[in-house]
């Protein structure tokens, strides 16, 4: 199973461009757009005015129409978490919350098709990571040798993924994407 080298994100608010100093709390949101999945980090003040911060909005719908210079775009919240920049540079990095990781995998899995190799490859790597984190287990079935059968340990939901042909450069690109979107500097605090 592939191990991942971890790098930190920029520690900067996507709205105000304020840099987060040691000890500062901020919010991270994993958002699905028409062009892919992005991670946005928000200062606490910017988070309060984001469409993702309102609990009643999150419970009703996680999809919002976002306007920008290029026009309106529909964005869907996959998950969010609150964290704090460490006081010391310990070098240890933590994952986003498990429910965010699984939600992103579910989103990738639902959008798999024969025409989108990028999503299929990212779903495959995410599946391996979820196995590594022991959130998914491998299930032995009489299927083709290139089919990976998995079960979510918590929900018992089953998945089948066909192993893609991934070269080392593509694996590195997927790792970089995951580093940018799914890692935190400190253990995640409980969501409010």
Image (spheres, helix red, strand yellow):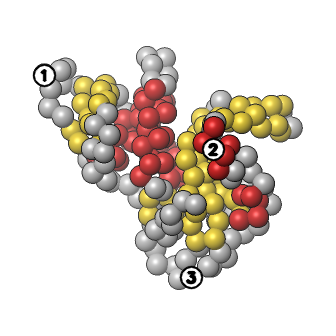
The quadrant holding residue 47 is: bottom right
As drawn, the residue found furthest toward the top would be 114
Report helix, strand or loop for mark 3. loop
Image location (x, y in percent) of residue 164: 35, 28
Please report the residue visible at 61 percent of the width from the left and 79 percent of the height from the top: 23
Q: Is residue 190 left or right of residue 59?
A: left
Residue 45 in sight in this render: yes
Instruction: Classify 45 as above or below 69.
Output: below
N-term-proximal mark, 1 vs 3: 3
N-term-proximal mark, 1 vs 2: 2
Q: Which mark is residue 58?
A: 2
Residue pointed to by mark 1: 142
Foreground residue among 192 and 104: 192
Distance from label 1 to label 3 (Cα)? 51 Å
Distance from label 3 to label 2 (Cα)? 31 Å
Please report the residue visible at 42 percent of the width from the left and 30 percent of the height from the top: 109
Image location (x, y in percent) of residue 58: 63, 44
Residue 132 in sight in this render: no
């Amino acid at each position: 199973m592939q191990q991942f080298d971890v790098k930190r994100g920029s520690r900067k608010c996507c709205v105000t461009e304020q840099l987060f100093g040691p000890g500062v709390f901020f919010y991270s949101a994993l958002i699905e757009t028409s062009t892919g999945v992005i991670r946005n980090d928000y200062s606490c003040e910017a988070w309060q005015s984001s469409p993702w911060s309102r609990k009643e909005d999150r419970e009703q719908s996680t999809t919002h129409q976002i306007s920008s210079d290029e026009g309106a775009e529909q964005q869907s919240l996959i998950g969010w978490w609150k964290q704090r920049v460490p006081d010391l540079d310990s070098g240890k990095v933590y994952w986003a919350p498990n429910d965010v990781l699984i939600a992103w995998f579910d989103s990738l899995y639902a959008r798999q098709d024969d025409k989108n190799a990028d999503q299929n490859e990212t779903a495959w790597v995410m599946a391996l990571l979820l196995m590594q984190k022991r959130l998914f287990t491998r299930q032995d079935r009489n299927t083709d040798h290139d089919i990976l059968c998995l079960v979510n340990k918590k929900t018992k939901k089953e998945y089948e993924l066909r192993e893609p042909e991934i070269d080392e450069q593509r694996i590195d690109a997927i790792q970089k994407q995951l580093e940018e979107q799914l890692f935190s500097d400190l253990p995640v605090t409980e969501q409010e």
